[in-house]
Image (spheres, rainbow, N blue to C red):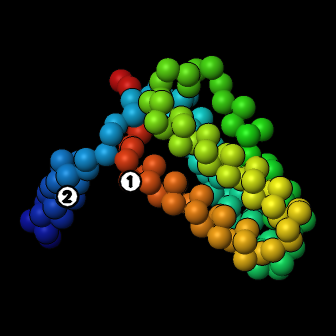
Amino acid sequence: MNKLLFMLILGVFANAVVAEETDKRQILKLSEPQREHVLQEMRALLSGTQSILDALAKDDMAAVAQQARLLGMTMAHKAEDHLKGALPQEFMKLGMTVHQDFDQIAADAESMKDSKHSLSQLSASMTKCVACHASYQIRTQH
């Protein structure tokens, strides 16, 4: 039993080391408050995206516009000064384009009222989220 437990623990640590060595994404070294701010924003984007998908499934274009607008540039301007200079320009630019995308989704949802168009826009914006998560990882500074 003890041998089995030892092997299990050893396997977990070995996997953690291998995973860390193979992760080639750029490390963003942030303080704990900076990390929490970025993660809260990402969670809000994910939750808002789910709300947009729910509204699209109901063909409720007013709700699509309302939810998308919450994720637009007004959300981006809530970024605190403590993030300036801590994140690479490429990361910041990509994030800003996502917020701009949501403003466009909101405007088009109101004017065009075309759920397929909004879904296509959302899909295109989500490719930026995928690209960002494939490129960066957040680590806290010690």
Question: At 53% across and 35% down in the image, what residue appears?
Answer: 92
Position above or below: 132 against 119: above
Residue drawn at 53 percent across, 43 percent down: 94
Is residue 103 left or right of 87 when viewed as pictured? right
Query: Residue furthest toward the left?
Result: 3
Q: Residue at x 54, y 29 (%)?
A: 34
Q: Quadrant of the N terminus?
A: bottom left
Q: Is residue 83 left or right of residue 61?
A: left
At label 1, the amino acid type is: Ala
> Residue 28: image x %, image y %?
39, 34
User: Where is residue 96 drawn, in percent x and y?
Assistant: 62, 40
- Residue 102 visible in the shown view: yes
Say what amino acid the circle numbered 2 marks: Asn
**Badge nearest the viewer, 2 or 1:** 1
Which residue was labeled with disc 2? Answer: 15
Vertical side of 76 occupied by 141: above or below: above
- Label 1 belongs to which residue? 134
Observer-nearest of 102 and 47: 102
